[in-house]
Amino acid sequence: MEQYTIDSIRNVVMLSHSGAGKTTLGEIMLFSTGAITRLGRVEEGTTASDYEPESLKRRISLNLSVLPYAYEKGESQPHRYPRLCRFHR
């Protein structure tokens, strides 16, 4: 596995309302960088970020997913927050 220095790692957060396409965008990012070899579909329950039985049953994301991939010279880590996530101060 390739090693990255802390200054070359970028974190990308996809934050939006339900149904906006965060999961699909995450799949496209993984596919276009070669992290996965096929695009998954939310409707079929075949995405890289939705793997828990309850998420597959409901066809919505219930938990945070980290989708690591390498892009150009740095590494990026998109974090996808589902609509059911609650933020507290």
Image (spheres, rainbow, N blue to C red):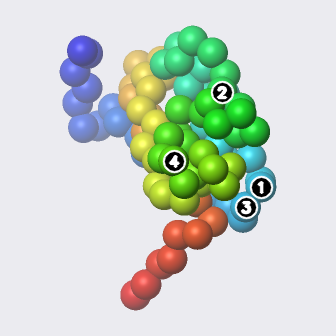
Q: In the rendered structure, which disc, 2 or 4, sits on the residue that comes first in sequence?
A: 2
Amino acid type, residue under disc 2 in the picture: Gly
How far, Cα to Cα, is label 2 from label 1? 16 Å
Amino acid at the residue labelled 4: Pro
Between 51 and 6, the one nearer to me in the picture: 51
Determine the secondary structure under disc 3. Answer: loop
Nearer to us of marks 1 and 4 is 4
Q: Which of marks 3 and 4 is nearer the N terminus?
A: 3
Tell me residue 74's x, y (percent): 39, 26
Answer whether residue 14 is visible to the viewer in this image.
no
Rendered residue at 25%/26% (across/down):
4
Task: Return the x and y of residue 36 as percentages of the image width and height.
Answer: 53, 18
The residue tagged 1 is: 19
Identify which amino acid the numbered label 3 is placed on: Ser
Instruction: Check disc 1 and report its element: helix, strand or loop.
Output: loop
Q: Residue at x 54, y 54 (%)?
A: 54
Q: Mark 3 points at which residue?
A: 18
Q: Verify CB contact (< 8 Å) between mark 2 and mark 4.
A: no
| Residue 40 - label | 2
Query: Badge 4 is on which residue?
Result: 53
Q: Residue shown at 51%/77% (left/top)?
A: 86
- In the image, what residue occupies the spot 68% across and 49% down? 59
Please, what secondary structure does the residue beneath circle 4 have?
helix
Residue that extends furthest to the bottom in the rendered view of this protein = 89
Q: In this view, does 34 lie to the left or right of 44?
A: left
Left or right of 83 in this view: 43: right
